[in-house]
Amino acid sequence: MRILLFTGKGGVGKTTVAAATALRTAEAGQRTLICSTDPAHSLGDAFDDTSLGDEPQPIATMGRGTLLGQQLDARARLEESWGEVREYLTALLDWAGAGAVEAEELAVIPGLDEVFALADIRAHAESGAYDVIVVDCAPTAETLRLLSLPDVLTWYMERVFPAQRHVTRAVRPLLSRLVSPPIAGDDVFRAVRRFYDRLDGVRDLLTDGGVTSARLVVNAERLVVSEARRTFTYLSLFGYHVDAVIANRLLPEAVTDPWFTSWKDVQREHLDAIRAAFDPVPVLTCNLADHELVGVDHLSDLAAELYGLRDAAAQLSLVEPFRVEADGDALVLSMQLPFTDRTDVELGRRNGELLVAVGSHRRAVVLPESLSRREVSEARMNDGRLEVEFVEVADDRPE
């Protein structure tokens, strides 16, 4: 079973590359599903206006291989799992003075609907109906929010939720007599629990490098490459495996018009920088086509150019986001944080967790027992990895 996540800056050709990859795995005889979590939903257009809906629908059959497609209706899933919470938040905001329309809009966290796509990915993976699931993710910022939520939600449900529910139950009768704002009832907490249950286990599935790989689609342009570098860092922070970078829409050598010479030189320079920066992750390339890449035939040609003799579903790189190694008497937690300087990283420790912040993204890493009993002696950046050294707690008791 393989899950391939395709992401990148909007407009780089992410959906086209994802569609070509899914077609390639189906041609190889694998039962393949491609689903879109991108609210723009252009996946059906890539297959020449194939009508795709909220349930998997057949796109093509190639011998033993099959290709199905799905454009997830995230709003329907949001209503199913978040309805009671939304109603409570709407009532609370209305009490606080927001107008009816404003309260209704503010009660839904931006981007929350996209998160429910993760539950469908888990369900498809557990069904046994597919060998490969290809996910056409939303553009980069939305993807990071989408993929970091299971980690954040797990932290909340294990630490904050039980205490919050207990306190609310204890003080609800008193609050109902003293104040007028709506108090969260058990139906709200049950809705939050259902929300969590839908995502429970998703993080383990998507951070298992033997099952799931993320692939970054880029163009050979400075701004696109800069965003891809940041995305690579943040995906590594949350434990996701990036196994390939795809440089799309390169000007082919057949273009010899002098007008394109400088642009080809710039692309060549950026491509060299991409290969050097992402090494040892492989960089796959495909040229700018002289026609629209729409329909099965054109997508098949693109996949052949992109993957050559490679198995499109294989794990193309074995870089580990996390590992723990012994260094003499010390243990070193090593976390992949490419394109990051020591000054970019903030570290803290609390209740058996290592708190890591890079830019606006933060993560609480639960320490294994072997590390939680030790103290941090040093932290350093070494060849794109954050290394945190743990040593035995000194025994200061007098003999």
Image (cartoon, rainbow, N blue to C red):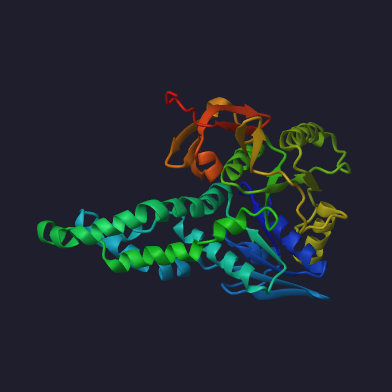
Q: Position of residue 209 (x, y in %)?
A: 68, 53
Q: Residue at x 84, y 44 (%)?
A: 252
Total labels drawn? 0
Visible in this render: residue 106?
no
Location of residue 41 by image quarter: bottom right
Residue 173 showing in the rendered view: yes
Quarter placement of the N terminus = bottom right
In the rendered view of the protein, which quadrant contains the C terminus?
A: top left
Q: Position of residue 169 (x, y in %)?
A: 23, 62
At which x and y percent is residue 102?
30, 56
Q: Residue furthest front?
A: 399
Q: Quadrant of residue 104?
A: bottom left
Farthest residue toward the left? 177
63 up-or-down from 357: above or below: below
* Residue visible at 33% across and 67% down in the picture: 84
Observer-nearest of 266 and 270:
270
Asked whether 177 or 348 is in front, the reply is 348
- Residue 267 or residue 156, whichever sits in front: 156
In the shown orientation, is residue 307 left or right of residue 106?
A: right
Q: Taking 184 as reference, is 61 above or below it?
A: below
Vertical placement of residue 335 versus 289, above or below: above
The x, y position of residue 243, in whole percent, is 72, 48
Query: Who's the residue at 79% across and 63% down the image?
Result: 24
Picture quadrant of residue 15: bottom right
